Image (spheres, grey):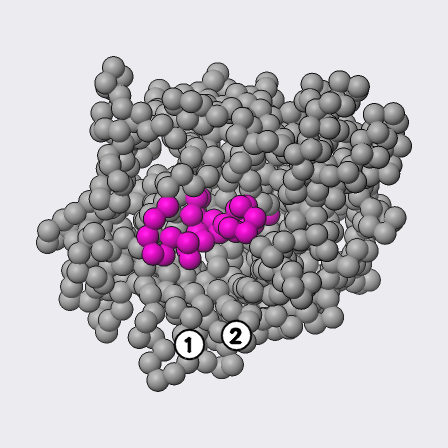
């Protein structure tokens, strides 16, 4: 039986991946140039009766990727390069979006001009040369006017280079040097112990204190205190108990943000999947006999052996049961709830993307349960194969009216009952050639839509970041869709720093200031990791223009709020530190179920703020959370598309096989303990493996001579389940300062540049990395074969091959890079001998 994760088929002579075939016999196929470079990727699904195909074009001399052509209308991508082989411009579509990258020769500044049909701005990053190059300032201009500025300061008195201060939009301002956010660290560690929000001359306005387990780097508590130097008031405190395996067994919530003090108790199965979360009023989780339950916040979950949810319940006195039916692809075909008249049937396209949600009995998948479904039901009953061909959006499950797992005569009477009841609902989801969600609309056709119907559209840049979101309302009288919301997003890495209004000539709506996320707060090494955990827990403040950007004093009604969190980086409150009392300072408050669904929300800014569970933006129109590479559905408790990273893992990669077989499971079904940075993967803790975040962070970010790029950060789940930083490096920048520059500044090939810009001692430097730092080296980018060959050789010679991981989140970068290693190693040996002779002379 074929695995749900897919079976890989390779070309014997070259070892190149030809196809990946799933359990339903659908496949993704690959074709290559004679030199082994990827030429075509062919998805299983079809558009206009043709399989969706991506064609890659390369420069005939350098071999650099020049064009990415899509067959389905997804905007094509074109690249140009500078003489060092670094990406210079990226153009999507017919000038729909253009990224123009400028790399400073001294690597002290990086700028990016973005223009086109939807955006027009310039972003500049300034690096701090005193502490190894982390960002010290981020600035954005539009029409030659500054619209955003944030600054970062570091500890220069020690060799830690830890982040100490952040200033930016939404935080207190002033003319001195005592305002902003200030980080303090626990004694003899890189763990953030305090986060202070200070005003010039006004002292500390808000204090976050993090306490840790004495023997393990586990958070014991997080306390957010108003006016700690005056009359302190606890806004919110999260007090945790961790079991012997490092899992959270309970958490106590106190503070004025909560309607009453309460605590959650958690239970797990032998795979450490969450099986129960029960909430009680009070502050002592040990009071089993006198517990006062919070009725609607009792949850239970059941799973099959591979991690598919089989059932769930909500409520303590009268639990509401939900059942989940899965298929051999680990997709949910149907969900059934005690509360719902209709079951919900789920359909997927041939590439595993959720494509539709339909009501039980909607056999023709038009969004309505009515007499129009009778012929479709009869066809499903008499000829299932013809039914599948006639109604490709549907599945037989839709006709299984009695939910017994079969479509037969026993479904006739239940189907008639569904028809008599009538109903409409469901939705369709649309995906582009990179399996990115680009549209969500009601299942019913336009002519049958009610006035309250809503449709959403999304667009992405070449790094898969969502740069536009549009929402339409249906006008029944005019019979047309009316655009009511048009958001444009400006990014620094994976962090949104500006939210613009496309309905008002891209006027600034909101500005965001970011600091250390969960990886950095847990000690991120040097340089500090600003977004190694995908920004989770790192959003410091929002500046909201409140819809007014013109007039004599447009800033008079602007809003400035600070974010506070629990230990998992879920937003708990937004606080106005400028008001006079703690009770009036809370502008938003959120409480969640274990899988991210909102169970409580209050405050004047609660609906406006979209950053909530896991510090990710949530779309109220769809109920989905946007993680970066994928969307998450809290009702299903999983992703709605396959993992683009796990799909590229080799079959024999230790610790990944089970995960690659299940590409929809989120956070290993343990969201109260684990996080996922940008929607790629969270590794199972039983393997003590690695949770990797951003593989393709930013073309040009951290660029080094020779054309390589590098990425700091990612997360490692250790046996005690705590997140410790690991260093993930790309290209010639293989380990901190293990690289140095040689030779004149002249055009060289990427391979020559890489070899020439590595010192002979690089292998010794790599091998000297302390094991307890958890350093791993990831080879997932085929743009710099020389760097990977040399890195692999260094680790092999040091007997550290277990620190070498091959990850391929991008289909352009598939295995086969090592075919040139013999030639590269020979060139490397000559380079080492030449350099040693030169230094001896």
Task: Give how far across and how far down residue 819 sits, in percent.
Answer: 76, 42
Q: Residue at x 27, y 69 (%)?
A: 173
The span picked out in magenta is: 601-629
Q: In the image, is 238 to the left or to the right of 748?
A: left
Q: Main secondary structure of the magenta part?
A: loop
Q: Position of residue 115 (x, y in %)?
A: 61, 73
Q: Residue 594 versus residue 472: which sits nearer the camera?
A: 472
Q: Is residue 318 above or below residue 647?
A: above
- Quadrant containing the N terminus in the rendered view: top right
Secondary structure beneath dot 2 equals helix
Residue 367 shown left or right of residue 558 in the figure: right
Rendered position, 273 above or below 81 = above
Locate residue 221: give its quadrant.
top left
- Residue at image mark 1: 549
Q: Is residue 609 magenta?
A: yes
Is 840 or 407 nearer to us in this picture? 407
Write down the quadrant of residue 655 in the picture.
top right
Q: Is residue 132 visible?
A: no
Q: Determine the residue located farthest toward the bottom in the rendered image.
A: 552
Which SS class for mark 1? loop
Depicted 736 relative to depicted 380: above or below: below
**Residue labelled with disc 2:** 504
């Amino acid at each position: 039986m074929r695995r749900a994760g897919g079976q890989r088929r390779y070309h014997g002579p070259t070892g190149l991946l030809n196809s990946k075939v799933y359990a339903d016999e659908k496949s993704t196929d690959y074709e290559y140039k004679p030199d082994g470079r990827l030429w075509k990727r062919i998805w299983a699904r079809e558009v206009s009766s043709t399989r969706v195909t991506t064609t890659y074009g390369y420069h005939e001399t350098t071999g650099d990727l020049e064009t990415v052509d899509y067959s389905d209308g997804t905007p094509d991508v074109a690249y140009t390069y500078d003489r060092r082989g670094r990406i210079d411009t990226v153009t999507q579509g017919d000038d729909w979006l253009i990224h123009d990258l400028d790399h400073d020769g001294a690597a002290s500044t990086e700028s990016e001009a973005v223009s086109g049909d939807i955006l027009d701005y310039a972003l500049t990053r300034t690096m701090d040369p005193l502490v190894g190059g982390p960002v010290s300032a981020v600035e954005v201009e539009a029409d030659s006017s500054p619209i955003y500025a944030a600054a970062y300061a570091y500890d220069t008195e020690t060799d830690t280079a830890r982040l100490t201060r952040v200033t930016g939009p939404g935080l207190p301002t002033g003319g001195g040097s005592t305002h902003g956010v200030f980080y303090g660290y626990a004694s003899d560690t890189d763990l953030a112990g305090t986060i202070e929000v200070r005003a010039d001359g006004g002292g500390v306005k808000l204090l976050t204190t993090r306490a840790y387990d004495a023997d393990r780097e586990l958070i014991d508590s997080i306390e957010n205190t108003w006016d700690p130097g005056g009359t302190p008031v606890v806004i919110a405190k999260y007090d945790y108990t961790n079991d012997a395996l490092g899992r959270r067994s309970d958490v106590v919530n106190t503070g004025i943000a909560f309607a009453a003090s309460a605590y959650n108790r958690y239970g797990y199965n032998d795979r450490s999947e969450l099986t129960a979360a029960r909430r009680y009023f009070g502050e002592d989780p040990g009071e089993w006999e006198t517990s006062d339950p919070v009725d609607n916040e009792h949850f239970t979950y059941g799973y099959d052996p591979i991690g598919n949810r089989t059932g769930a319940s909500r409520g303590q006195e009268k639990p509401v049961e939900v059942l989940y039916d899965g298929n051999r692809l680990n997709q949910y075909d149907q969900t059934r709830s005690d509360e719902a008249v209709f079951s919900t049937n789920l359909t997927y396209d041939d590439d595993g993307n959720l494509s539709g949600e339909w009501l039980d009995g909607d056999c023709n998948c038009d969004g309505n349960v009515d007499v129009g479904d009778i012929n479709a039901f009869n066809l499903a009953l008499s000829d299932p194969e013809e039914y599948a061909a006639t109604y490709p959006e549907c599945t037989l499950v839709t006709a299984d009216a009695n939910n017994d797992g079969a479509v037969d005569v026993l479904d006739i009477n239940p189907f008639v009952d569904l028809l008599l009841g009538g109903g409409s609902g469901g939705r369709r989801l649309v995906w582009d050639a990179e399996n990115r969600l680009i549209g969500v609309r009601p299942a019913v056709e336009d002519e049958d839509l009610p006035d309250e119907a809503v449709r959403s559209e999304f667009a992405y840049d070449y790094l898969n970041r969502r740069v536009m979101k549009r929402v339409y309302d249906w006008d029944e009288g005019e019979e047309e869709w009316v655009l009511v919301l048009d958001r444009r997003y400006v990014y620094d890495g994976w962090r949104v720093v500006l939210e613009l209004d496309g309905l008002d000539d891209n006027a600034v709506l909101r500005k965001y200031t970011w600091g250390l996320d969960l990886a950095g707060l847990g000690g991120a090494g040097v340089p500090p990791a600003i977004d190694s955990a995908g920004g989770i827990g790192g959003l410091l403040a929002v500046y909201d223009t409140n819809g007014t950007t013109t007039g004599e004093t447009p800033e008079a009604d602007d809003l400035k709020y600070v974010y506070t969190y629990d230990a998992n980086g879920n937003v708990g409150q937004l606080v106005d530190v400028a008001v006079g009392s703690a009770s009036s300072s809370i502008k938003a408050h959120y409480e969640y179920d274990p899988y991210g669904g909102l169970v409580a929300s209050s405050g004047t800014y609660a609906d406006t703020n979209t950053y909530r569970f896991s510090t990710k933006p949530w779309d109220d129109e769809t109920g989905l959370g946007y993680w970066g590479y994928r969307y998450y559905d809290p009702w299903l408790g999983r992703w709605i598309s396959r993992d683009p990273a796990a799909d590229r893992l080799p079959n024999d990669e230790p610790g990944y096989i089970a995960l690659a077989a299940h590409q929809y499971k989120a956070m290993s079904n343990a969201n109260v303990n684990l996080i996922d940075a940008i929607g790629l993967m969270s590794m199972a803790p039983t393997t003590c493996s690695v949770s990797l975040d951003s593989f393709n962070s930013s073309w040009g970010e951290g660029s080094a001579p020779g054309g390589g790029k590098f990425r700091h950060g990612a997360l490692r789940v250790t046996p005690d389940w705590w997140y410790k930083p690991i260093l993930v490096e790309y290209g010639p920048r293989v380990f901190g300062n293990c690289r140095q520059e040689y030779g004149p500044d002249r055009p060289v090939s990427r391979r020559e540049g890489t070899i020439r810009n590595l010192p002979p001692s690089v292998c010794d430097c790599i091998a000297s990395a302390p094991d307890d730092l958890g350093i791993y080296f990831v080879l997932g980018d085929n743009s710099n074969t020389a760097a990977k060959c040399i890195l692999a050789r260094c680790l092999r010679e040091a007997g550290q091959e277990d620190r070498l991981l091959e990850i391929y989140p991008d289909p352009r970068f598939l295995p086969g890079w090592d075919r040139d290693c013999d030639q590269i190693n020979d060139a490397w040996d000559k380079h080492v001998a030449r350099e040693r002779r030169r230094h001896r002379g």
